[in-house]
Amino acid sequence: MADLSLLQDSQEDTDGYGYSSESDAIIIPSALDFVSQDEMLTPLGRIDKYINSENIFNRQMVARSILETLRVISDDDRECVCVLERMERLADDSEPTVRAELMEQIPHIAIFCQENRPSIPFAFSKYLLPVVVRYLADQNNLVRKTSQAALLVLLEQELIDRGDVESLVCPVLVDLTAPDSNDDVKTEAMAIICKMAPMVGKDITERLFLPRFCEMCCDCRMFHVRKVCAANFGDMCSVVGGEATEELLLPRFFQLCSDNVWGVRKACAECFMSVSSATSPEVRRSKLSSLFISLISDPSRWVRQAAFQSLGQFISTFASACSNAGQYFRDSSGESDWTHSTKTDGACGSSAEMPCVAQQQNGVSHNPSNCEEQSLDDDVGEEGGGEQTAEVLSADDECIPEETENPSTSPEPNLREKSSENICAASPDVPDHELFNSFHYWRTPIPELDLNLLEEDIPASTAPAAPALDRKYLEELIENLEPHTDDPDVKAQVDVLTAALRATVFDSRIEDGFLEPRPAQSNPFSSQSASTQVSCYDEDSEASDSLNPEDEQKSKHQDVVPQALLDQYLSMTDPSRAQTVDMEIAKHCAYSLPGVALTLGRQNWHCLRDTYETLASDMQWKVRRTLAFSIHELALILGDHLTAADLVPVFNSFLKDLDEVRIGVLKHLYHFLKLLHQDTRRKYLYQLQEFLVTDNSRNWRFRSELAEQLVLLLELYSPQDVHDYLRPLAFCLCTDRVSSVRWTSYRLVSEIIRKLSTCSALLVNFLSELVDKFCHSSKWSGRQAFAFVCQLSIEEECLTLDQFSEHMLPPLLQLASDPVPNVRVLLAKTLRQTLLEREYFLNSANCHQEALEHTLVTLQTDVDKDVKYFSCIHLGSNRLNEDAMSTTSSTY
């Protein structure tokens, strides 16, 4: 298109600056003249005309029209090459806006060349890619940003050959990050390198990018570069793998976590989970946990805030196949109550068949938490939060001897061959090579016990006078042994000590609440009578009320994750944290709680129970809403017993909460109720009607979600329960003021028909009420709803055609005389598009065929043209399906 500048150029070509030489009149050429002149030019000639124009907008127009020009001349390879040559010349334009406009078009041009011009294989690498690479170092910020975006698009679309990436793109980016490069260019180039790493893969990243990345992490002059490296550290670790991460990247990460700029440390905290996922469990436990504690205690509030937000994610990286998460729950017979595969989303991720509780690894796993806690306290105290250097934090290496790095190298068989007395006693005659197994190293030596004393029968009357085994002393022994109960020998010792402890207090009826619940099994080392045998408590019914503060603190201990991390996570519900860290810290704690629970396993749920109850009663509705949306995930992790004991009360409180909280429960109502026992599940039939009442009556989406959940809940209840409790809810929702709720409810009614079809008496009663309330309704919308339910029942095969013909067809045909055309329209559609497609209704032996044909003739002579059209339309018409889709719009 011609613009004002072209008009002025033409006027200047006339004599006397726009005046004719033969008259004094001003000659103003019509704009159509210029349009006609451009139309006479070839596409290539039009580019040549404007590419050298002094008007910036004309040159921008050329850049914008290159793609369209290529489409016009796509049949001629030679002209396509000429256009690309003109584009290459335009790339040297001195105006930044022209260059930026051209760069925006290059990804589209590249896609066109790849799809339509395979005969020009060199087009991209010769004409397009050099322009993109050159603009990465452009002096104008807009041009650089545009070229960076274009480069990433080209890489994502896989338009750049791998050889070109390695030979043309990567060297340029590495040069742009050189020490003498411009600061802004260096920062942007490093950001592009980090984003490119996942696209180009491990080989190129390690050879070309990794050395410069490690160098930039230590750039002492530009904190912006260090911040970019810190923000993308996790992506780089995931690309290069665990070996390169631990050898090359982790030392730099330690330095970044102790950077003197809080923004760099904050970026490290945000990507901590990705870094942890790329390391081995030993490094994660011995080094990264202490490093993370330093970020949690950082002087900067913003760093602490980011660290606490990532804490739950970091804890989730400690989950492993041997963590005994136990996603199968077992009954007393030892068989699985719940054997079908389940898939979950959210914090728990996707899980098919989870490992069984009974599956435990043999051997003793080392627990370096004590050593870590001590080193953490020293580090934080000496270095002042997050300012410690990598050299100080690397002192954790000294805490773990090489012999204990790999549990498989511990002298476990020799340990089992020793007698039970020698297991508990670190006597001087123990060989040196056994002094450094995981049990002996991490725990103080346990004094020798006279086990014969414990094997004697201890009558209840003489229990308080039993030979001196101090209660506190036994508690300490049990506490030291409990983290190692994976070893059968150690577990047997714990059972013996537990029996002795309970026997000493049996007569005085003292409740030993500090003891961990254990599965009921016989004690092979004990010969106590039945009166003194310890009855094992179910893990869901431990008496938490009897815990004193000291014992309560002991109950929070576990050996899955470093205890210091769990303690920090549990402190997120402390009100002081909201004042010193983040006002929404409790929400972040609630968000990550299912992941933490899955990591710890249900055997360590006691560590999280109090925290969960605190979050469930939090004053902020956003915290309760977060828990409501994930309560079904937590139930899947904990199993039926713990769910009934600890989650059902919280679930009941959520049912009476604000609508913002209740919607979280409602959206996953089916998934939660199906995990409960049938008796418990049946109790909620009485409460489903409470979902009909909302804080805001206009919140129709709440009722629509209820209708969808009721469709799923039908499979959990018997036909009688469905008829007694869900039927009234379905009829109520079918009369809702909002059409979207009604249409969902019609599907619910059809599914109820399917559920009751196996019980003739209930089905007859339901269909009779359906006809009475809807087919004979005084409102036309109710009569129309009946026609739609009939249509759904046939299409979804909710009941047999004989049952339909007997109970629903006669009242349906009566709607042919309905005074409202919309009802007759839907009736015509139902007859033509649903019933007459079944051979059953076309059979002359059918007693209802005559009535159906008579009704159809009546509708074909209807005064309403829409009714006449839908009753006369041929079954094979192409418009049939389109008209069927217009049911909602034509009737409401």
Image: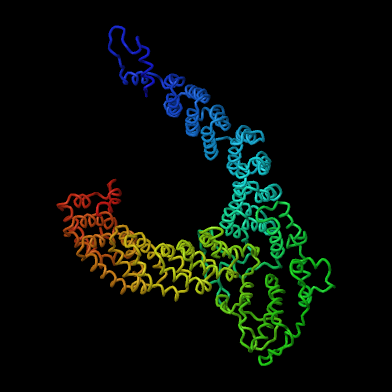
Going by the image, does 808 lie left or right of 361? left
Name which quarter of the figure residue 196 lies in: top right
Going by the image, does 418 lie left or right of 87? right
Outermost residue to the top: 22
Q: Position of residue 78 (x, y in %)?
A: 49, 22
Of 750 and 633, the residue lying toward us: 633
Q: Position of residue 630 (x, y in %)?
A: 49, 63
Name which quarter of the figure residue 521 lies in: bottom right
Can residue 74 be seen here? The reply is no
Task: Identify the image's colour scheme: rainbow, by chain, secondary structure or one colour.
Answer: rainbow
Q: Position of residue 458 (x, y in %)?
A: 69, 89
Name which quarter of the figure residue 714 lies in: bottom left
Seen at 35% across and 12% down, the residue is 17
Q: Quadrant of the C terminus?
A: bottom left
**Total numbered labels:** 0
Seen at 70% across and 49% down, the residue is 251
Position of 384 relative to 800 (above/below): above
Going by the image, does 354 lie left or right of 855? right
Of 432 and 23, the residue lying toward us: 23
Of 749 and 876, the residue lying toward us: 749
Position of 526 relative to 809 (above/below): below
Position of 443 relative to 495 (above/below): above
Of 731 and 619, the residue lying toward us: 619
Outermost residue to the bottom: 461
Q: Quadrant of the N terminus?
A: top left
Can residue 758 be seen here? The reply is yes
Q: Position of residue 553 (x, y in %)?
A: 62, 72
